[in-house]
Every structure is written in structure tokens, then in C-alpha cells.
């Protein structure tokens, strides 16, 4: 927990965001006025300080991670503290207590870490690992059925086995869908296989038939394909590279015609859409003005709005959230934290006070998730 967000009185950040909220209500932000130009000095404290209220209860979060015991090495840079490495392996009371402190009613857990299924080169091993991961998860979430649920890990190395495992997870284990950590490697370390390819279409037919969402989660680019990041390791990971990898993968799905064939598919993206809401207008604009066209029948933005859902995981920024809501609508946005890579307290401190309408806040906090996951 970061304590700076829980000081008595109004924090500097809380004060500024309330000012921005008032401006948004007055229509000033929509009119193109930069809040920082007109807001009162954020360094000053309000005269009438009000205590921070308790977190709004009832939130549902969809990008919350666990790891199998023994799969997180001590030198794993994405979880640099012993505490965070403990948190990702805690599927019990410690995690529930954190959820209680942040008003999180339900978390959908998924496996993510350096040993995710998509990095397993041998297909038979990936199939076994997926089963073990999903069996482990269901055993633990069963202890807190109202607080924890699961997204399936899938052996995408074998599309047919992935479809079978997803079917098992939905029909027998009661999971809510799947979360896959980016493209998959198969047989060779230097292989990157994307899911728009024809061999995956029968898998997508199963996803549509089961009517469950598929969460496309980031992963690191392959070590052999990081030329652009050379000498700047900080760019390759979650700071920027994750969004590049995942947005390209999502654009491949959209442009392939996959959603023309399976129009009811539901894909979830984290991190406020990995940059796509911001860039989608230009994507279609440039396609319309060049001779290089995707296979898909409709504008790319159509698929972003009709086949994708977007979560707030690890992107606690009102300016960006407003852009996402304006591009895809509040019905398509869902709350998430990205625990333990992110802090539940920081996420809730931002979200509960973000200057958006109360009906939208309720939809994003839980209403959309209840509908999407049929809770
Ligand atoms: Mn994540």
C-alpha cells in the first residue's frame, strides 16, 4: 500500500483531480481548455479539508494475477520486492484482506509471470502445464467462491488442445473466460505465433460458441527481436513495449477478418486499451488514404467498439480514461488493478474519485463485468 494516498485531509493529487472534475462538469475540459492552465495552484491546500472517505465497495477486477509456487525467481525485475513476490503467490487471506481494504468485492485471477504457458516450447508440456495451472487455480478460488474466480490459462501452442482446455475450464471448473499472455512460442525459442493465423480460427469458433471473453494480456518481446530497444531495456517491458506488442496483436486480429467470421467474439485488453483508443481514428484514416488494405470488411474502429472490452489495469489516469470512454463508450470499460504489479490502494484512490459521472463509475466498477461475465 502506498501511504501517500491515504493521508488525512486532501492530498495534492486528490485536490487537483477534484478541481479537474469541477472543470469537466462545467464543460471546460470538453471545450479544450487545459485544466492545468486554469486550476488553482495544486500546491495549496483547501481551507475546508475533508477526510478521505472509505473506498467505494463492490468493485470487480479482471486483471489480477497469481503464479504457481516456485515460478517467480528472486531476480524477477517486474516484481522487485520479496513482498510483491509473496503477494503473487497468495491466493488466500492476505489477498482477500487487501481486497477488503480497497473495496474489491471480486477478483478474476489469471496466471502471469516469467514462466507463463506461452513461453513453453514443447507443446505437450504446455498442454500439461495449462491443466496443472487451471487445476491449481480452481482448487484455491473454491475456498472463496464469492471473492475469487478464474480465467483459464491455455496451451495456444496447440489450437485444438487450447479449445478443449477452455471448454473444460468453462463447463467443468466454472471459469469466466481465458487470459493468454500474448503470442506463443512453439518448438523454437525464436518463434512468435499470432492468433489471427488460419490454424486458430477453429479455436475462435469455440470461444464464440462458449460465449466467454478472451483476455489478450501483454508479454515481453523475444530477446532476439528487441533491436529497437537495444541499450534501453526500460522501454521493452511494461513501460511501453507491452503496449506495442499487444496493440499490434490486437490490430492483427481486427484486420484479419476474424470478427467478420465470428462477430460475437469478445476480446479484453488491459492498460486502457494499450494505446489503441488514442490511435484508432488515424489507423482508419490512413488505411482510407493508402492502397494497403486489411482483409477485414469494416473500419478497424468498428471492431474495437463491437468486439473489444478495455480495462483500467495499471493505467490510473483520468485524461486517458476519458479518451477511452469517448472512443468506445462507458459500457465497454471495466475496472482492474493488475495486482500485485500494481497497488490496489492506489487504483481505488484514483478510480473512486475520478471526475466521471456516477452512472459510468458504477458501470465500470462492476455493472459491465456482471453483464460480460454473467455474474
Ligand atoms: Mn497484468
Image (spheres, rainbow, N blue to C red):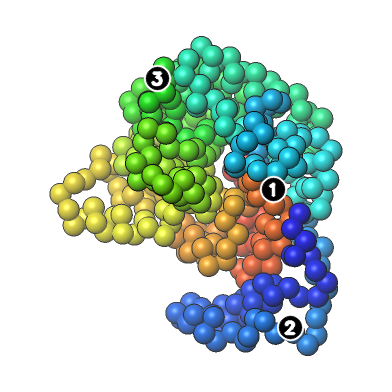
Residue 307 visible at all: no
Q: Quadrant of the C terminus?
A: top right
Q: Is residue 194 above or below residue 375?
A: above
Regarding residue 146, the answer to whether it shows in the image is yes
Q: Which mark is residue 45?
A: 2
The circle drawn on residue 3 is none
Q: Secondary structure at mark 1?
A: strand
Q: Residues within 10 Å of mark 2 (few under 14, many from 20)?
A: some
Is 55 placed above or below 240 here? Answer: below
Indicate which disc residue 60 carries: 1
Mark closer to the observer (1, 2): 2
Q: Quadrant of residue 9?
A: bottom right
Q: Secondary structure at mark 2?
A: loop
* Mark 3 lies on residue: 188
Q: Residue at x 31, y 59 (%)?
A: 282
Q: Residue at x 34, y 41 (%)?
A: 227
Q: In the rendered structure, which disc, 1 or 3, sits on the residue that comes first in sequence?
A: 1
Instruction: Report the Cα–Cα distance between label 1 and label 2.
Output: 33 Å
Mark toward the start of the polypeptide (3 vs 2): 2
For image coordinates 57% across by 27% down, the residue present is 115
Mark 2 beta carbon near ligand 1 (under 8 Å): no
> Whole-percent x and y of residue 126?
53, 18
Q: Nearer the viewer, mark 1 or mark 3?
A: 3
Q: Residue furthest front?
A: 231
Amino acid at each position: 500500500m502506498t501511504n501517500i494516498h491515504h493521508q488525512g485531509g486532501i492530498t495534492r493529487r486528490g485536490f487537483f483531480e477534484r478541481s479537474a472534475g469541477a472543470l469537466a462538469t462545467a464543460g471546460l475540459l470538453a471545450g479544450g481548455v487545459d485544466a492545468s492552465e486554469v486550476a488553482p495552484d495544486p500546491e495549496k491546500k483547501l481551507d475546508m479539508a475533508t477526510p478521505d472517505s472509505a473506498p467505494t465497495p463492490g468493485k470487480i477486477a479482471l486483471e489480477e494475477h497469481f503464479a504457481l509456487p516456485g515460478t517467480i525467481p528472486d531476480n524477477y525485475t517486474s516484481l522487485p520486492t520479496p513482498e510483491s513476490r509473496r503477494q503473487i503467490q497468495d491466493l488466500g487471506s492476505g489477498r482477500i484482506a487487501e481486497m477488503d481494504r480497497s473495496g474489491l468485492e471480486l477478483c478474476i485471477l489469471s496466471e502471469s509471470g516469467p514462466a507463463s504457458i506461452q513461453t513453453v516450447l514443447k507443446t505437450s508440456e504446455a498442454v500439461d502445464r495449462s491443466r496443472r495451472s487451471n487445476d491449481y487455480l480452481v482448487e484455491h478460488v473454491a475456498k472463496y467462491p464469492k471473492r475469487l474466480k478464474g480465467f483459464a490459462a491455455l496451451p495456444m501452442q496447440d489450437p485444438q488442445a487450447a479449445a478443449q482446455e477452455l471448454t473444460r475450464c468453462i463447463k467443468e471448473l466454472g471459469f469466466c473466460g481465458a487470459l493468454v499472455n500474448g503470442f506463443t512460442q512453439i518448438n523454437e525459442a525464436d518463434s512468435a505465433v499470432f492468433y489471427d493465423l488460419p490454424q486458430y480460427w477453429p479455436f475462435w469458433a469455440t470461444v464464440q460458441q462458449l460465449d466467454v471473453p478472451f483476455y489478450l494480456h501483454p508479454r515481453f518481446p523475444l530477446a532476439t527481436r528487441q533491436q529497437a530497444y537495444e541499450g534501453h531495456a526500460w522501454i521493452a517491458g511494461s513501460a511501453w513495449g507491452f503496449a506495442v506488442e499487444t496493440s499490434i496483436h490486437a490490430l492483427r486480429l481486427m484486420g484479419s477478418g476474424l470478427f467478420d467470421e465470428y462477430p460475437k467474439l469478445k476480446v479484453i485488453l488491459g492498460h486502457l486499451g494499450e494505446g489503441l483508443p488514442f490511435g484508432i481514428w488515424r489507423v482508419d484514416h490512413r488505411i482510407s488514404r493508402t492502397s494497403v488494405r486489411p482483409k477485414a470488411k469494416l473500419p478497424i474502429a468498428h471492431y474495437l467498439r463491437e468486439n473489444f472490452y478495455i480495462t483500467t489495469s495499471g493505467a490510473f489516469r483520468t485524461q486517458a480514461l476519458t479518451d477511452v470512454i469517448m472512443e468506445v463508450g462507458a459500457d465497454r470499460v471495466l475496472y482492474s488493478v493488475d495486482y500485485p504489479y500494481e497497488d490496489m490502494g492506489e487504483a481505488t484512490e484514483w478510480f473512486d474519485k475520478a471526475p466521471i459521472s456516477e452512472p459510468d463509475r458504477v458501470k465500470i466498477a462492476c455493472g459491465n463485468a456482471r453483464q460480460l461475465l454473467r455474474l
